[in-house]
Image (cartoon, rainbow, N blue to C red):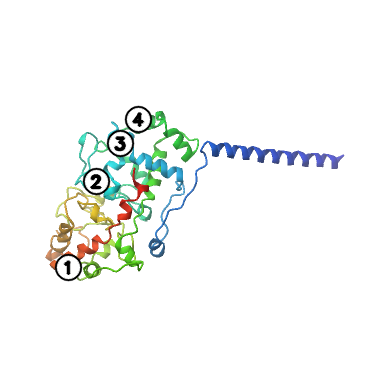
Amino acid sequence: MDKLYLVYKLICKSLYIFSFLILLSCSSKNEEQEGYIPVFVDLKIPQLFKDKIIAPVIPENNPLTEEGIALGKKLFFDKILSKDNTVSCATCHDPKKSFTDNLQFSEGINNNVGTRNAMPLFNLAWNFDERFAWDGKEFSLEEQAFEPVTNHLEMNSDWKEVVLKLQKDTEYPTLFKQAFGDIPIDSNLVVKAIAQFERTLISGNSKFDKFLRGEIQLTLEEQNGFNVFMDEARGDCFHCHGSENNPLWTDNQFHNNGLDINFTDLGLGAVTGDPNDNGKFRSPSLRNLEFTAPYMHDGRFKTLEEVINHYSEGLKFSTTIDPLMKKIDKGGVQLTAKDKKDLKTFLLSLSDFDFINNSNFQK
């Protein structure tokens, strides 16, 4: 009798497991049909990046998926995020301008003008410092995407209002479900999707990249410009902006580069509260400078010539100026006219036309 009971239990248990597996299979198929199972993807990383820098930073709670990236791209270009439906992320971050707007100060709704120059967007997945914006006030790409929506000078909206518009839209509920499953649309999902798209914005195919890969040669002017860039006695640019061993062309750190004697914008100092950080701003990447004028956090320099002249003879001393700024007593490194011209030529060799023309990044 006991043996029969044990056999009976074993049969029942087997039938239960079999039934559970069938239900699980049906459930998975239903979820897949409804778009509940996103397709995980890896970034397409240039070989130079793989060879010279460590893996990108992808948060565990926001992995890259085909559906999430597609949703983020749509949101990035959609003016629905702004109060009056006139401004999108792409308004200030135009792909054709290396995701800047070529204005000294970006403009929001009702022609409101901001106080900072729009930073270009590329290679953001390699920001190992995890501080974003000119002053480092945001600690992730996701956090960075929150603020413009409610900033009165930018989109001047309200997250509750934005979520309501997305919920009522004919497409977004399905797209969010495909990307994140059966979770109510909220601001966290919006910024996660945008951050996913932004992490795919990779620039790594400039003329200088091709030179490093052994595909082409530099001109004599470009080579001399690179030598100026690397020479501590002349340009000494590499301390803040990297070298051929750092394809990001930035250290992603914050420096006072001698723009002012007194500060109307404290930069990092306003974020940390430390007076030693006053006047410090993020070192932007030197990639794609051809497309991102004007320059500096406040867009004060209209041309690369003005930028080079600043480091050559325009430095202004202040108590927090970075010790990396050389020959401060002389106003800068005192480049010759030829070195200035060649340095600009080298900097332009960091232009990535494939990046700005990449259809995956266009609307």
Disc 2 to disc 4, C-alpha distance: 27 Å
Disc 4 to disc 1, C-alpha distance: 54 Å
Which residue in the protein does label 1 denote?
339
Q: Secondary structure at mark 3?
A: helix
**Of the residues under marks 4 and 3, which one precedes in the sequence?**
3
Disc 2 to disc 3, C-alpha distance: 20 Å
Between disc 2 and disc 4, the foreground one is 2
Residue in the picture at 20% in, 67% down: 235
Does residue 334 show up? no
Query: Label 2 sits on what residue type?
Result: Asp
Residue 147 vs residue 21, the one in the foreground: 21
Horizontal and vertical percent position of residue 314: 13, 60
- Seen in the image, is 315 located left or right of residue 121? left
Which residue in the protein does label 3 denote?
150
Q: Secondary structure at mark 1?
A: helix
Horizontal and vertical percent position of residue 219: 24, 68
Disc 3 to disc 1, C-alpha distance: 45 Å
Q: Quadrant of the C terminus?
A: top left
Label 4: how many Cα within 10 Å (few below 14, some 14–19, many 20+): few
